[in-house]
Image: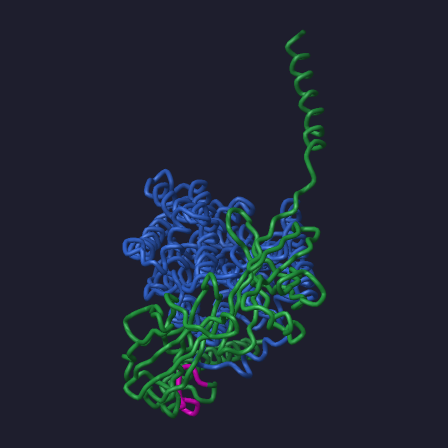
Amino acid sequence: MENSTLAADEKIIADLLPQKFGKWGKIWTGFLIAICLVGMFAYYRQLRYGLIVTNMRDYVSWGIYISNFVFFVAISLVGSLITAVFRLANVHWSTPLTRIAEMIAVAAIIFASLIIIVDMGRPERFYNLFTHGRIQSPIIWDVIVITTYFFISILLLFYPLLPDIKILLRFKERSGKWLHKFYSFIGSFWKGTPAQFKLSDKAINILCITIIPVAFTIHTVTSWLFATTYRPGWDSTNFGAYFIAGAFLVGSGAVVVAMYVFRKAYHLEKYITENHFEKMGRIVVLLALLYLYFNVNEFLTPAFKMKESESAYLLGLFTGDFALPFWFAIIIGMILPILILLFKKGRRPLPVFIVGVMVVVGAWFKRYLIVTPTLLHPFLPMHDVPESYRHYFPSWEEWAITCGSLAGAMLIITILARIFPIIPIQETITEQHETVK
Amino acid sequence: MKPLNKILTGLLSVLFLLPAYDGFSQAAQKADLSVAIGYFNVNNQVPYLTVNVKTKKTGRFQPVGGIAVKLFLNKDSAGTFIGKVVTNDKGTANANIPLSVKKEWDVSASHTFLATFEGNKEYEAAKTDLTVGRAKILISATDDKKITASVFELKDKNWVPLKGIELKIAVKRLGGDLPVNETPTFTTDSTGQASADFKRDQLPGDSKGNIILVAKVEDNDQFGNLSIEKTVPWGSKFQYVSTFDKRTLFATRDKAPIWLQFIAYSIIVAVWGILVYLVFNVIKIRKLGEDIT
């Protein structure tokens, strides 16, 4: 009996150990690095010539960078949902997904921080935010809360990794010299004693409790960057909840995409099962319904009143210049996912993956629509301004930097998946033992 | 002809026609400019001119900056040259009427201003003119808060009253002019006068209660824009209350409200206290592991 258990444990370990990149893994990594390099070159040009290389002007002073920032902040919330909420609710089926969620959260929050610096005309003055920041400003609240969330996400990735590091250290030859040194540096002290487990479990519980209000704060504060500014479309008391609902949706969408890709790439069908897609599908459909509800709140009541000061903005979204991305975000990002996932057949791995992609892409456009159309429709009409002030379409530098940041986030997830087990090994073994009992 | 040959012949024809189509196309045409002159006389001092340049793009008029416009008085000659102005981003430029044209100015009671643009790579040459008669406006106010504006025209070296001129009598405010009562405009009678009763009591003035009355003739076809101001102590005294040293949400960082600081710093200390504790927890776990080793 004991021998068979040991053999089963070894099988799990063998299945879940990080794997070296294959041919497609190398091509994928090379592709991401290439996009990042183009983005870095574009950023060099922005540093060299200033923000004039962007198409942001007096009216649209927050363009694609801030849209991207909101997108990253939104997606980072998934760490708190999958790991913290499910763990505290004693949901065990989500165990294989926790590491994926934590990796996405860490990658997203890193790039959320970076993209804010990219948006600054004089990034070398960034430290002034800390030395001269006003506690009355929502921007400072955002800086503080992002920094806090970053550290919590790192700790939430690190603590559950410790038992796995002990396992990884057993496979020096497979890991290679440098990776083995790295594992030793971060976790050779973990011996798996009951005292260590007790401390670790306590820490994880504290983290799970702490991360939920911090996650709510990070996205609420991000929404307040807009809602505390008196503009058509932003002047809403609903913004905090609206942003959080959207964030949970895009985060879950990202997790199902990552689940599918990792499952295929690393042959994890035994661990990330169809049942996981079924359950994640249900979560995504619930969140999509919730977000759709908030969208109805956000747009139906202002559209019903159609105040003169907001009509140009609203009509721009419904039937004007922004109608295509607006209806794309609503239909592809919410309504179609709901329709697909309501059916059992729609909650199979491939449809769930496709829905995940739709949700993530739709969510990106949604963030763009939150930022840009409002800035193009100020309360006081634009008079006698250069033509370039009236429209906004990102320059190639802005696109390159944005794509570079998205590629960078995916690169971090790819590297983390190369270094660490995508599915927590020790937790899987423990759960296996409990199932057998 | 076989069907295949027909298709090939057709495709070749299209291929040959495509460059031909491009070859027949004409060079890009220069755009037309719309130039407008405005004449302003404020407080019966030296008048000035404004130039406004626009062009039509995608069905809408857009201001054009960087356009050099020459201005002349009555005729295009060296002695009547007012000046050369270049429009700004908003497509406007201003020019005072210089002393050098005083001789020409004094000759007649009516003048024609000429504006010429010689054309450049983008825009065709353009010119326009504006004829205005010399007029002046006066304002007076009585103790019973009655305001009278008078408009006169220069005729045969004499100022004669102008009848039927539409004007505004208002109070000058920061964002625009506030009419002194519910009547938006007034018209001068045969004596060239128009009167209005001041009905804006308790209007905030400066620290002494002074407000500025203004009488304005705007965009008149014959006389352009005329305006005159008069300061009267009819407003309420405005006492500026400085919030500079108060704790407010819009104050400097050292003047943040106490309640905000208390809430914000309590949250920060609580959360970061937990994070520091969790880092020490790692050290504790590390120590436990080292003890076993």
Task: Identify the residue shown where x is 39% and y is 85%.
Answer: B248
Q: Residue B278: give x, y in percent of width and height.
A: 47, 77
Q: Colour of chain B?
A: green
* Direction from residue A244 to residue B285 in the image, left or right: right
- In the figure, the blue chain has which letter? A
Location of residue A42 by image quarter: bottom right
- Give the camera-side residue of A144 and B240: B240
Q: Main secondary structure of the magenta part?
A: loop
Q: Residue at x 52, y 53 (%)?
A: B61
Q: What is the residue that sits farthest to the front in this orientation?
A: B156
Q: Is residue A64 left or right of residue A212?
A: right
Of residues A365 and B187, the one drawn nearer to the viewer in this rendering: B187
Q: Which residues are magenta?
A: B242-251
- Return the residue nearer the eye: A244 or A430: A244
Instruction: Assess whether residue B250 is covered by the magenta stretch.
Output: yes
Q: Is residue A98 above or below residue B170?
A: above
Q: Residue furthest top?
A: B1
